[in-house]
Image (spheres, rainbow, N blue to C red):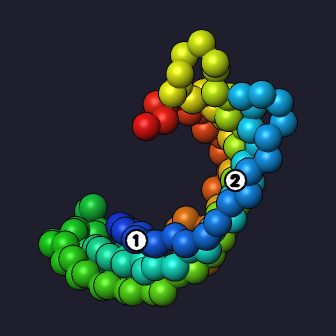
Amino acid sequence: MPKNANTNIWFATGGGNVSYKITEGLFFVSELSMLMGKQETSYIITTANVTYTNVPPYTLVKSYTTQEEKEQKTIYGAHIEEHLFYHPKKAKGLIIGTSIFIRFLNAKYYENDLGICAYLGIKI
C-alpha cells in the first residue's frame, strides 16, 4: 500500500542575541532563539483492488482507490546562530557577513538543520 506524505511546517521564533566588537567595523553576534509551531501532514494512501483469475496472466488489477489521512502535531525546538559582520568605513551603511547555524525541531520530517549563510545588506 503506497503512502505519499505532504508536510507543511509553520513556526514562530523568539530569542535574543549578544554582540561583541572585535575590531573597528568587525562584529561577532551570537544568537539563540526558541521555536514553536505546528506541523500538518497529509497522507495519500493508494490501494489496488485485484481480481485473481485462472487464466494467464493470473492476476488482473481492476481499479485503484485513494484515501487521505491528516495529522497535526505541535512542534518546538531551538535555533543557534553565530554571525560575523563587517561594516566597511568607506561604504557607509553597508554590511557584509557570514554565519553558521543549527536548528533542532521535534518535527517528523524536518528534525535538524545545519548550514551557513552569507549576508549583504544596508543598515538604515
- The amino acid beneath tag 2 is Glu
Mark number for residue 10? 1
Q: Kindly report the distance in space between the C-alpha atoms of the residues bearing marks 2 and 1.
A: 20 Å
Q: Which residue is mark 2?
A: 81
Label 1 Cα crowd, 10 Å radius (few <14 / some 14-19 / many 20+):
few
Q: Judge from the rendering whether residue 120 lies leftward or rightward of residue 2; answer left or right.
A: right
Q: Position of residue 16 (x, y in %)?
A: 64, 66
In this orientation, which residue lies closer to the viewer: 74 or 65?
Answer: 74
Q: Residue at 32% x, 85% y: name it.
A: 70
Q: Residue at 64% x, 20% y: name it.
A: 88
Where is 77 relative to 121, above or below? below
Q: Judge from the rendering whether residue 73 lies leftward or rightward of residue 29; answer left or right.
A: left
Where is 6 relative to 116, above or below? below
Q: Residue at 68% x, 34% y: name it.
A: 85
Comes first in the chain, label 2 or label 1: 1
- The amino acid beneath tag 1 is Trp
